[in-house]
Image (cartoon, rainbow, N blue to C red):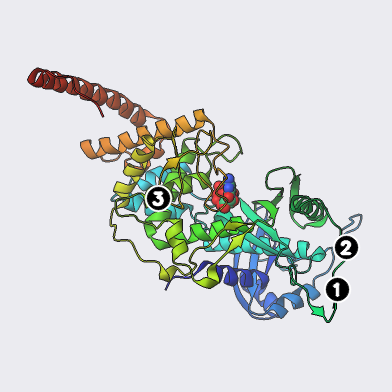
Amino acid sequence: MKTNFSDVQNVRHEQAKHSVLISCPPKIHETKFLQYLAQHGEVASHFFFDSNGTHAVVEFVDLQSVESLLSVTKIPSDEDVYVVPYKSRYIRVKTTNAGQQFPKCWPQTSLPMNNLIEKLSTAENIEDQAQMLLDELQLTEESIRLRYLVSSLISDIATAYFPEATVHLYGSSVNSFGKMGCDLDLFLNLEDIKGYKSGKSTGAYTAEFWMRRVSSGRTAQQKILSVIGECIDSFGPGCNEVHKILNARCPLVRFSHQPSGLQCDLTADNKIALRCSELLYIYSNLDHRVRALVFAVRCWARAHGITSSIPGQWITNFSLTMMVLFFLQKRNSPIIPTLDQLKSLAGKKEKCIIDGNDCTFVGDLNKIKQTANTETLDILLIEFLEFYGKFDFKTNCIDIRKGLEKNKPEVAALYIQNPFEQTLNVSKNVNQPQLQRFVNLAQESAFILQDQVRESAKIGKPWGLASILLTNGSDRETTTKRKKKILASERIGGLLDSLKDNGNTGKRKVEH
Ligand code: CTP
Ligand code: MG
């Protein structure tokens, strides 16, 4: 049985509510520390991590234990220090009886690229390399728990004003394509406030709240985010570098959560993006090759500066994911269904319209038929690079709803139709030079991999996925020279053949 997205979300949110974030002394006696906490109730799980000091995430079995711990937690009273007395579940534990040892901290960073390339070169085939890459880069259990906890702490700040609001995670933290260190996308859901749409009438009377009226939903979002941003900035424990980016298409508050080291983007009412995260979660959990290929492609693109951590005219990870999904839909025997096919499997209760956009699709993974396609990742990686190396980006748009190329509805270097807001282009930001870099790199990397199939890789040298992650060095130069040589000899061969053909038929060859 595969676990559905909403079930995962519910379990994670519950875990987070039962958890506290604790700043600890660098050396701590783990057993005594846990005994101290256990006075408040049974500890369900805990781990330590080192980020701007030693921290622990401690999950209690009962919610009351959290309350009990907070009830004995004091407000700092150091002389000459003034505090904003906002109490949260981010606390500090001090001790006069420090341990002799550093606690075992869960590692928060993944292998540097050079070591990763070395490691991948020890694999048997590209399939294994892709799996190794995934194991190295994917979010760990601890990182996922920490992300939900940060979301829960931000939710506590927001609900101080809007008690029924909820904060959700979306994007790569939850869609199963998250890599260690990726940003934390959050959205504040105010729409599910009880009775938002309907009230209760008694006889001829109805009552409604006297609320401030604003000119548009966007203005309301901007006002709310502005205030929440102010709260995060003024008394959000551990939150700093708060920027309100309220004029963006999707207004947001960006801040850094220091103890977790997470870069957070908080938006308001971004339900479609949550739906999109669920869709990606479904695709990634349908077949193991989806995640492996997405990770391989994202890592390859990052290594070559095709994607960047700075916003700009670069292709984004989200766009790359859509490109991989589209490619997998286009296999002779498709590896994943189209969005329309997922929609046709949805039950009546799953009908979902958000802001007039049809976001209906089946949520139960177990209702989706497995593919008969058995292609290995060795094949899929080369074919992905070839597919986009010769894709007609000038004319065509990528559409995972239909799984078909179609004419671009408007001018843009790269057009990837948003699966739900179908008039939007996910990759509107990408310019022609950036797209061309992607195409050139795809062609070159496809060639490197094909060349290895022709030549059989040299022992001890990076090969397969590892070789296309290399950004410079002699291996890559040699391959580029070989590519030129082979292309030249292929051209000469082709020329000779065509001369022979012309000699035989006396006609000019027509190229289709
Ligand atoms: N999104 C979208 N249209 C875009 C950009 C983003 O619908 N043009 C939505 C997607 O659902 C995406 C989410 O916003 O997953 C978060 O965007 P972003 O952080 O850019 O992408 P992630 O998928 O989270 O990938 P990354 O690991 O790079 O953060
Ligand atoms: Mg993100």
Q: Residue 77 carries which label?
A: 2
Q: Position of residue 52 (x, y in %)?
A: 67, 52
Q: Do the residues labelled 2 and 1 touch (CB within 8 Å)?
A: no
Residue lying at the far front of the rendered structure: 204
Q: Label 1 amino acid? A: Ala
Q: Earlier in the sequence, mark 2 or mark 1?
A: 2
Q: Which amino acid, by three-letter code, is at mark 3?
A: Leu
Mark 3 or mark 2, earlier in chain: 2
Q: In this view, does 40 lie to the left or right of 77?
A: left
Residue positioned 44% across, 67% down in the render: 345
Q: Which mark is residue 293?
A: 3
State the residue at coordinates (57%, 38%): 428
What quarter of the picture does the N terminus occupy?
bottom left
Label ID, residue 207: 1
Q: How far apart are marks 3 and 2 (CA)?
A: 53 Å
**Rendered position, 1 above or below 283:** below
**3 or 1: mark nearer the eye:** 1
**Callout 3: SS:** helix
Between the residue at mark 3 and the residue at mark 1, the CA separation in whole angstroms equals: 55 Å
What is the crowding at mark 3: few (fewer than 14 residues within 10 Å), some, or many (at least 20)?
many
In the picture provided, is 124 more to the left or to the right than 70? left
Q: Distance between the residues labelled 2 and 1?
A: 47 Å
Residue lying at the far right in this picture: please name it: 80
Residue 426, located in which quarter of the rendered image?
Answer: top right
Q: Callout 2, which amino acid?
A: Ser
Residue 114, above or below 504: below
Q: How crowded is mark 2: few (under 14 residues within 10 Å), some or many (20 or more)?
A: few
| Number of on-image labels | 3
Q: Does the residue labelled 2 lie within 8 Å of ligand 2?
A: no
The reply to whether the C-beta atoms of the residues labelled 3 and 1 are less than 8 Å apart is no
Residue drawn at x 92%, y 54% is 80
Q: Is mark 2 on a helix, strand or loop?
A: loop
